Amino acid sequence: MDLTVLPPRTADELDTMREAGRVVARTLAAVRAAAVPGVRLRELDDLAKTTMYEAGATSSFLGYKPAWAPTAYNGVLCLSPNEVVVHGRPSGQRLKDGDLLSVDCGTVVDGWNGDAAISLLVGEQASDDDARLVTATEEALAAGIAAAVPGATLQDVARAVDDVARRYGYAHLPDHGGHGIGRSMHEPPFVPNRPSAGLDRVRLHAGSTLAIEPMLLAGGDRYRHKKDGWAVVTADGRRAAHVEHTVAVTDDGPVVLTAP
C-alpha cells in the first residue's frame, strides 16, 4: 500500500517546538488558576497574552484568518464555555460557578508552533456529568497519544480516541479534529477523532509531529456556528469538552511537546 508520511523534524526543530510547547503549558496553567467565577473571558485572554509575550513567544491565533472565517481572529486564546465546543472568542462574558470552560492556546517560538487545549470546571458547583465529560475527553487524548508510535497510522490514533468516546457514550464533532503542526499551526494531514477511509495510508515515523485533539459532546454530534462565524456550538445545547496536545513521535515512544 502506498503510504503518506508526515515530514520528520530534526532534533533541533523538535527542541524549538518543545520551547513553544512549554510556553503554551505555562500560559494554560496561568489561565486555569485565574478562571474563577466573575472573571471575564477577555481578562483571561489578556493574561495569556502577557504570559506568552513575557516568555518571548508570539501567538499562533491572533490575526489568524482561514478561508472559511469571516474575520481575522481577535485573541490569543479560544475560550469556549459550556455548549461552545471550540473557537469561542474572547469577550466580556463573565464565568459563573459551575461553568465548563475549554481553553485552546497556540504559540510560536523562532518560527515553530506549539498548540494545546484544556477543559476545566469553574468554581465549586461543577456537576458530576461535566466532570465525567472532562475525564473522558482527557482519557481519549491520552489514548490517542499512546497510539502515536513509529509504524502506526492515523487510523490507529483515531481508533484509540474513538474507543474511549464510545465507552463513555459521547459523540464527536463529525468534521473537526487534530492536525499536523510545525512551521505552521495547521499543516496536513487532518487528524480525525474517529476511524475513516484512507487514514491507514498516513504512516507515523520518528520525528513526525501532530496535534491530537479530542472534542467530546454530551449530546448529539450536530452543531451550528454563532453569528460571529467562529464559535462552534452544540445544536442541542448540551455541553462539550476539548483537550489537545502537540506530540512528537519518537523511537522511544510519543513525547508530549506541550507538557509543563
Image (tube, helix red, strand yellow):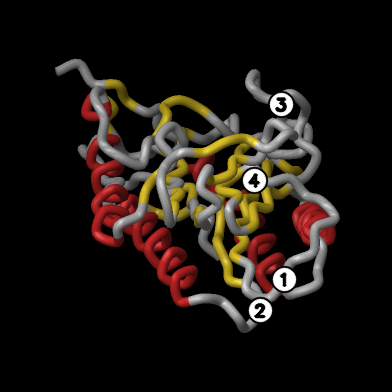
Q: Position of residue 238 (x, y in %)?
A: 51, 55
Q: CA distance from mark 2 to mark 4?
A: 25 Å
Question: Picture coordinates of residue 197 (x, y %)?
Answer: 24, 25
Which of disc 4 and disc 3 is earlier in sequence?
3
* Gap between marks 1 and 2 measured at Cα: 8 Å
Callout 1 touching callout 2 (CB < 8 Å): yes
Camera-side mark, 3 or 2 = 2
Q: Residue 39's image quarter?
A: bottom right
Residue 16, visible in the rendered structure: no
Residue at numbered disc 3: 65
- Which label's residue is closer to the chain start, 3 or 2? 3
Q: Position of residue 50 (x, y in %)?
A: 83, 57
**What residue is shown at x 56% (from left), y 76% (from top)?**
126
Give amino acid for label 2.
Gly
Q: Position of residue 112 (x, y in %)?
A: 61, 38
Residue occupying the far bottom of the picture:
124
Residue at 68% x, 41% y is 108
The quarter of the picture where residue 198 lies is: top left
Seen from the viewer's position, the closer of residues 112 and 45 is 45
Q: Which sits earlier in the primary sequence, circle 4 or circle 1?
A: 1
Callout 2 crowding tier (Cα within 10 Å): few <14, some 14–19, many ≥20: some
Helix, strand or loop status at disc 3: loop
Give the structural element (helix, strand or loop) at label 4: strand
Dividing the image into 4 quarters, which one contains the C terminus?
Answer: bottom right
Query: Taking 247 as reference, is 223 left or right?
Result: right
Say which residue label 2 marks: 123
- Residue to which mark 1 is pinned: 96
> Which SS class for mark 1?
loop
Q: Earlier in the sequence, mark 1 or mark 2?
A: 1
Q: Nearer the viewer, residue 203 or 77?
A: 77
Which secondary structure lies at badge 2? loop
State whether residue 209 is above or below residue 188: below
